[in-house]
Image (spheres, rainbow, N blue to C red):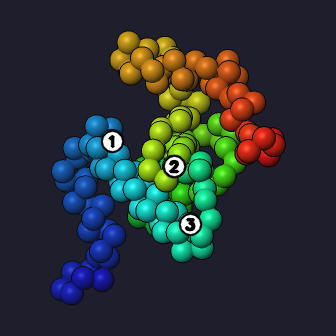
Amino acid sequence: MVRGIDKTYGQLILEAQSLMDTGQQVGETVQPIMRKLKEIIEQVVQMQYDECMKKGFDLPKYYIHIFIVKDPLASQGMGAHNILRIRKPHVRVTRPSPYQDEDHYLWSVTNYDHIKFEWCVPSKQITQYILAHPHEFDADYVRMLKMYCNDKLEKLEDYLVGDKII
């Protein structure tokens, strides 16, 4: 409770949101998330480099795999239905499959500092919308989604570590 008021903090936030009634637009979310993803990627790359130098091993290529999910508890506790949460990034030597889930991103890191965006797999609904309106989106991204839908996004060499398939 807030002193002198008979409403909880959460109730006050919801009331303020309803009075403003502007809602949050997608464009308002994209820039902060992209900045946060950039910060996370740079932090992970530095941490991985430091760990390799500390332990004296070489890691010529690895992947950073991140999921962005809607927080299922936010709608229950505060009535906020579209709270996004960036799950802890996974650093791995093997390449994850783009077909294992939705709303996930993959970058590869070569020679400790060459960061390459590999793919982003959105939800099925968003994928359908993008493919139905390709002129509204980046051509390379639309091409990647078409490859994903046609099961052509992966190649055998993506799963080679050294000369072995892992």
- Figure disc tally: 3
**Mark pair 3, 1: CA separation:** 33 Å
Residue 101 in the image: state x and y as whole percent.
66, 42
Point out the tag, 2 or 1, that comes first from the N-terminus.
1
Q: Which mark is residue 148?
A: none
Residue 139 appears in the rendering: yes
Asked if labels 2 and 3 touch by Cβ distance under 8 angstroms, the answer is no
Q: Nearer the viewer, residue 136 or 43?
A: 43
Q: Closer to us: mark 3 or mark 1?
A: 3
Residue 129 x %, y %: 48, 21
- Marks 3/1 in contact by CB < 8 Å: the verdict is no
Label 3 vs 1, first from the N-terminus: 1
Using the image as rendered, state which of residue 94 and residue 40 is in the foreground. Answer: 94
The mark nearer the N terminus, 3 or 2, is 3
Q: Amino acid at mark 2?
A: Asn
Q: Quadrant of residue 89?
A: bottom right
Q: Which residue is mark 1?
A: 30
Please identify the quadrant where the N terminus is shown: bottom left
Please tell me which residue is depicted at 45% across the width and 21% down the height of the picture. 140
Picture quadrant where residue 138 is located: top left
Disc number at residue 111?
A: 2
Between marks 2 and 1, how big is the CA–CA gap?
29 Å
Three-letter amino acid code of the residue under disc 3: Cys
Amino acid type, residue under disc 1 in the picture: Val
Residue shown at 53%/36% (left/top)? 118
Q: Quadrant of residue 163?
A: top right
Above-or-below relation of 157 to 50: above
Q: Which residue is mark 3?
A: 52
Residue 35 is left or right of residue 132, and the answer is left
Residue count near mark 3 (Cα–Cα under 10 Å), binned few <14, some 14–19, many ≥20? some
